[in-house]
Image (spheres, rainbow, N blue to C red):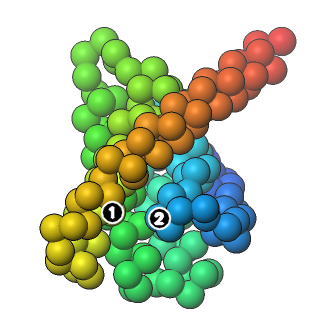
Amino acid sequence: MGHNDKLIAGFAALAITIHLLESALPSPVPGIKPGLANLVTLYVLIRHGWSLAANVTLIRVIAASLLLGSFLSPTFAMSLAGAIASLTILGVAWHFPGKPFGPVGLSILAAMAHISAQVVTAYLLFIPHDSLFTLLPILLTAALISGTLGGILVSKILERVDSITNT
């Protein structure tokens, strides 16, 4: 097993574990979760690049859905759509000249893309009613908050890892 394979496996296992734990948490508002497993994606993106982050994320979405019994269900479709949208926006933002987005900006972009893709997926596949989009301001506000907090947390983790590895 190559070095990248080991990194992907380790980070995917961590992300799957976090995803499973988060799925057990009650949600005060349906559809709103903190997205803690996505913090692993952000960390991997910043430390190891987009390709490894994409692998970790897609493995997490598929493996967690298999473990939770939601593979190929509406939940899986929405999770996969959110992951693909997040990975897409992260890929674009990560390759901007000068890397203008830090962890907080990247996290906000990913969270906004994730929830937007989930709403569009719900509309296209499950609830084709325009009133679904009335939820978007609430969901985008939650994404802004969770994206900001997640980015701050990843920033702190990066600082901590750097302080440990540079001593």
The answer to whether residue 55 is above or below residue 48 is: below
- Which amino acid, by three-letter code, is at mark 1? Gln
Q: Between residues 26 and 95, which one lies in front from this camera angle? A: 26
Expressed as whole percent of the image width and height from the top left, the position of residue 93 reads 30, 30
- Which amino acid, by three-letter code, is at mark 2? Gly
Expressed as whole percent of the image width and height from the top left, the position of residue 72 reads 39, 85
Instruction: Note whether residue 59 is visible.
Output: no
Q: How many neighbours does mark 1 have within 10 angstroms: few (below 14), some (14-19), or many (20 or more)? A: many
Which residue is at a point 17% across and 74% down the rendered structure image?
129
Q: How many neighbours does mark 2 have within 10 angstroms: few (below 14), some (14-19), or many (20 or more)? A: few
Residue 107 appears left or right of 134: right
| Numbered disc 2: secondary structure | loop
- Per the image, the residue denoted by label 1 is 118
Cα distance between the residues tagged 2 and 1 = 9 Å
- Per the image, the residue denoted by label 2 is 31
Residue 111 appears left or right of 36: left
Expressed as whole percent of the image width and height from the top left, the position of residue 71 reads 46, 84
Q: Quadrant of residue 109?
A: top left
Which residue is at a point 59% across and 45% down the rendered structure image?
40
Q: Between residues 122 and 64, which one lies in front from this camera angle? A: 122
> Which of pointers 2 and 1 indicates the residue nearer the eye?
2
Q: Are marks 2 and 1 in contact (CB under 8 Å)?
A: yes
